[in-house]
Amino acid sequence: MVGPLVTAGASRAPGGRREALQSQLEEDPPPGMLAYVEGEVAGWVWSIICFLVRVGYRRRGVAAALLDGVVEFARRSGAQGVEAYPIDPEGGRVDVGFGYVGVTPMFEKAGFRRVVETSAHSDGRPRILMRLEF
């Protein structure tokens, strides 16, 4: 299940964080998306330049579920498309410290197409601009 992300506010006044969190529940669109596994937050993402999946939930499809949820949310919100900047694992494994950008096969499976190789790198591999148009 994927749902809206609520983040802590910058206020340091007593009760300020609670008020900031509560006010974010009213935002449209919300500041991000959460992935739940059996009622526990397993990962979160908003911009598709970064995925964060908790230890213990990796290699279980959480990133793909986040991607599907963000794409569906963008589509419902009237976006014309979604872009991402994953790396191509070139048939190998990607170190988790560098894989936060996602991998091209996951995006291709979701219907994204490769647009151009960027000058940015992660894990020594170029990041690829990929786009899904609605």
Image (tube, grey):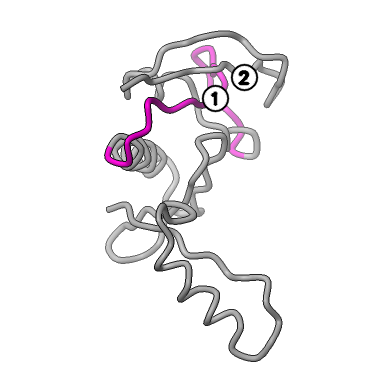
Q: Which residue is depicted at the point 66% across and 17% down?
A: 125
Q: Would you name the residue on which mark 2 appears?
A: 127
Callout 1 touching callout 2 (CB < 8 Å): yes
Find out whether residue 92 is within the magenta segment. Answer: yes
Where residue 10 appears, as percent x and y from the top left, is 68, 71
Q: Residues within 10 Å of mark 1 (few under 14, many from 20)?
A: many
Where residue 33 appears, as percent x and y from the top left, is 41, 52
Name the element at disc 1: loop
Res 122 → quadrant: top right
What's drawn in magenta, residue-wise? 76-96
In this picture, residue 10 sits left or right of residue 106: right
Amino acid type assigned to the residue bearing label 1 in the image = Pro
Q: Which residue is depicted at the point 29% across and 38% down?
A: 72
- Looking at this view, is 85 or 39 the one in front? 85
Dot 1 or dot 2: first in sequence order is 1
Q: Would you name the residue on which mark 1 appears?
A: 86
Q: Which residue is depicted at the point 32% across and 24% down?
A: 110
Q: Is residue 77 above or below residue 83?
A: below
Q: Is residue 41 above or below residue 68?
A: below
Amino acid type assigned to the residue bearing label 2 in the image = Arg
Inter-mark Cα distance, 1 to 2: 5 Å
Find out whether residue 80 is within the magenta segment. Answer: yes
The image quadrant where one finds the C terminus is: top left
Main SS, magenta residues:
loop
Q: Residues within 10 Å of mark 2 (few under 14, many from 20)?
A: many
Q: Residue furthest bottom?
A: 14
